[in-house]
């Protein structure tokens, strides 16, 4: 019996410790790393489906620099070709080539009239903007996070995210306004390894929960990480050049 007890104790000591469950903060940091790497460049398309049955596809190049800097160049359709968007810290502008000037825009404004808002596309820093807690998940093999806004300038007042347990990839999201009403819901699909060791959803479908016939689909056609862009690229003086 003594020998058996000693052997059992040896096995217990030698056995690897079970991996600790991630905290809400761990999962939120993972989301930010997946959906908003430090610097990157993408070629993307957004198709907005309207309630009248029409749709429009926007072709764009997106560039992210450090310190919450972001720039978008629109390549199509013809009605928006030459337009640009710029984010620097908490400030955002849209540049209209026919006016040759930039106009201030806000986080919660619609991105090109679709169902993403400007911050959905031009800012992913949920760790800075929201507090998170783990809640019960009705989605199999997924963690659920509830996010509460830290200030009134965030894109939403509350968000609920579901992340796959096996790798932390986002599965779906729900986005709420000040009244507690759900404004949008998102589905993340087409997980793609764009660079070795870096995988993310290549497609996000954002559904309008207030106007059910509306939705917008964002598709990444390509993505490069660790793109070092000159600081000048993220200034108003460079817009339109």
Image: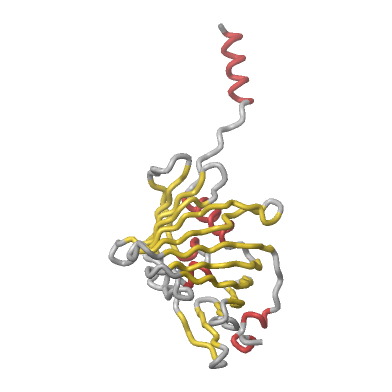
Q: Residue furthest front?
A: 53
Number of numbered markers: 0
Q: Residue furthest left?
A: 179
> Residue at point 57% right, 62% down?
219
Q: Is residue 160 left or right of residue 88?
A: left
Q: Position of residue 85 (x, y in %)?
A: 55, 79
Q: Nearer the viewer, residue 154 or 103?
A: 103
Q: Quadrant of the N terminus?
A: top right
Q: Nearer the viewer, residue 31 or 130?
A: 31
Q: Residue furthest bottom?
A: 99
Q: Is residue 113 left or right of residue 3?
A: left
> Residue at point 56% right, 77% down?
77
Residue 237 quadrant: bottom right
> Residue at point 41% right, 61% down?
207
Is residue 114 positioned above or below 86 on the image?
A: above
Q: Position of residue 73 (x, y in %)?
A: 61, 77
> Residue at point 50% right, 41% down?
21
Q: Position of residue 239 (x, y in %)?
A: 61, 86
Q: Residue furthest top?
A: 1
Q: Quadrant of the C terminus?
A: bottom right
Q: Position of residue 235 (x, y in %)?
A: 61, 84
Q: How is the image coloured?
A: secondary structure
């Amino acid at each position: 019996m003594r020998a058996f007890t000693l052997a059992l104790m040896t096995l217990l000591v030698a056995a690897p410790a079970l991996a600790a469950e991630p905290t809400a903060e761990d999962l939120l940091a993972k989301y930010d790393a997946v959906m908003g790497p430090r610097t990157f460049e993408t070629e993307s398309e957004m198709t907005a489906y309207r309630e009248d049955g029409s749709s429009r596809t926007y072709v764009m190049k997106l560039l992210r620099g450090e310190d919450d800097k972001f720039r978008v160049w629109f390549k199509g359709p013809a009605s928006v070709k030459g337009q640009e968007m710029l984010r620097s810290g908490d400030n955002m502008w849209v540049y209209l080539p026919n006016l040759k000037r930039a106009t201030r825009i806000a986080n919660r404004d619609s991105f090109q009239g679709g169902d993403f808002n400007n911050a959905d596309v031009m800012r992913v820093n949920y760790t800075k903007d929201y507090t998170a807690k783990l809640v019960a998940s009705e989605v199999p093999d997924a963690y659920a996070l509830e996010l509460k806004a830290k200030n009134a300038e965030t894109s939403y007042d509350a968000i609920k995210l579901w992340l796959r347990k096996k790798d932390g990839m986002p599965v779906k999201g729900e986005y709420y306004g000040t009244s507690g009403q759900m404004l949008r819901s998102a589905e993340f699909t087409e997980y793609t390894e764009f660079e070795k060791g870096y995988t993310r959803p290549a497609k996000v479908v954002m559904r309008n929960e207030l106007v059910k016939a509306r939705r917008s689909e964002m598709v990444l056609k390509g993505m490069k990480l660790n793109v070092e862009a000159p600081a000048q690229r993220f200034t108003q003086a460079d817009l339109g050049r």
